[in-house]
Image (cartoon, rainbow, N blue to C red):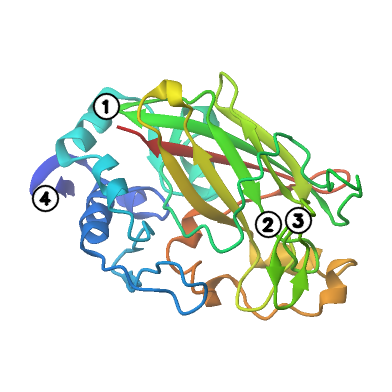
């Protein structure tokens, strides 16, 4: 069987090419077309722009959340073809399943992931730290199961995928009770506290590592961590990628059986019931491995930087 990109032959495909989550090139092209046509509808939940489109065909549409400038950075048809010819990297879309099936190491992978909304609780606190569990003022540690996340950030340009150094990676998320720091909400007021927030700069290999806790839950959302990646001015035009990361439901069920998570009761929303997860969340999954005292996970990502 021959694969095509809008009528142009790319290469012979076998059955494994249709095993999710291996990326079929035409779906990136579909995302750019869809993203450029999306109207800017307001979310009834947070007041942020929320795409009105859901599943269609083989893949759920990628979430560019009305940011038309992102469409300009997507690969054109001929640049995509050059990617297949000019580089030995394997292009996937989300999920460690794809990593295991395609390559023994994540270092040769170039994983393009969809953007999602930043939500209402992003604050540019400028907290440069790897361990984000404590509140800087009180030094009090946030209780929860330890979680280490290593980001592997790459730049995909002109058919080449290279480590991206000096990129600023911010993460933020709620604690075991479902509470965010430094915000005033109808359910809580944590103004002045800065737990579970921070940023790191990627090293020469494009790696940035954080020590945090496994997140809790709050109403209308599944368990998630927010991430924002911004390029350094030295790279040229400033680039920003914003999205969210998710966890397997069965692992969350296991972690949330114990204190301090269990004090928050049984969570109400699982991944596929979450209105934001449904727009590409299955391509933003973490696959944590158990350690002596918690979990560790790796999140490879390639940014489409022009």
| Distance from the alpha carbon under mark 2 to that under mark 4 | 41 Å
Q: Earlier in the sequence, mark 2 or mark 4?
A: 4
Residue 122 percent location from the top left of the image: 59, 55
> Sequence-wise, which precedes: disc 1 or disc 2?
1
SS at circle 4: loop
Crowd class of label 1 (few under 14; some 14 to 19; many from 20; radius 10 Å): some
Q: Residue at x 64, y 62 (%)?
A: 248
**Of the two numbered discs 2 and 4 in the rendering, the one whose residue sits closer to the viewer:** 2
Residue 24 seen from this side = no
Query: Toward the viewer: 86 or 157?
Result: 157
**Badge 4: how crowded within 10 Å, few (<14), some, or many (20+)?**
few
Residues 141 and 216: in front is 141
Residue at the top extreme, as displayed = 204
- Per the image, the residue denoted by label 4 is 6
| Horizontal side of residue 61 vs 211, given as left or right | left
Quarter of the C terminus within the rendering = top left
* Foreground disc of the pair 3, 4: 3
Residue 214 image label: 3
Task: Kindly indicate the quadrant of the structure image that contains residue 83.
Answer: top left
Residue 173 has which mark? Answer: 2
Horizontal arrangement in the rendering, residue 63 relative to residue 260 (left or right): left
Considering only order in the chain, which callout, 3 or 1, is on the residue closer to the N terminus? 1
Horizontal and vertical percent for residue 229? Answer: 51, 40
- Name the front one of labels 3 and 2: 2
- Coordinates of residue 36 in the picture (x, y in percent): 22, 57
Image height of 272 relative to 183, above or below:
below
For the residue labelled by badge 2, is the local secondary structure a helix, a strand or a loop? Answer: loop
Within 10 Å of disc 3 (Cα), the crowding (few <14, some 14-19, many 20+) is: many
């Amino acid at each position: 069987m021959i694969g095509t990109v809008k009528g142009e032959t790319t290469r012979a495909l076998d059955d494994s090419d249709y095993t999710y989550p291996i990326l079929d090139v035409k779906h990136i092209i579909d995302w750019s077309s869809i993203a450029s046509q999306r109207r800017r509808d307001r979310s009834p939940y947070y007041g942020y722009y929320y795409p009105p489109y859901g599943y269609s065909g083989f893949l759920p549409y990628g979430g560019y959340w009305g940011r038309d400038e992102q469409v300009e950075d997507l690969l054109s048809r001929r640049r995509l073809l050059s990617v297949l010819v000019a580089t030995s990297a394997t292009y996937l879309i989300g999920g460690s399943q794809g990593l295991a099936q395609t390559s023994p190491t994540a270092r040769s992978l170039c994983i393009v992931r969809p953007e999602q909304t930043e939500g209402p609780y992003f604050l540019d606190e400028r907290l440069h730290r790897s361990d984000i569990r404590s509140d800087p003022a009180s030094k009090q540690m946030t209780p929860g199961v330890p979680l280490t996340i290593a980001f592997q950030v790459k730049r995909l340009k002109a058919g080449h995928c290279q480590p991206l150094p000096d990129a600023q990676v911010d993460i933020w998320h709620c604690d075991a009770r479902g509470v965010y720091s430094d915000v005033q909400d109808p359910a809580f007021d944590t103004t002045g506290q800065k737990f579970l927030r921070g940023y790191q700069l990627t090293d020469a290999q494009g790696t940035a590592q954080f020590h945090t806790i496994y997140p809790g839950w709050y109403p209308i959302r599944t368990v998630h961590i927010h991430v924002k990646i911004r390029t350094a001015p030295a790279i040229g035009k400033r680039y920003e990628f914003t999205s969210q990361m998710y966890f397997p439901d069965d692992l969350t069920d296991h972690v949330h059986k114990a204190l301090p998570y269990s004090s928050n009761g049984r969570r109400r929303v699982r991944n596929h019931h979450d209105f934001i997860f449904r727009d590409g969340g299955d391509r933003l999954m973490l696959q944590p491995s158990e350690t002596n005292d918690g979990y560790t996970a790796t999140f490879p990502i390639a940014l489409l930087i022009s």
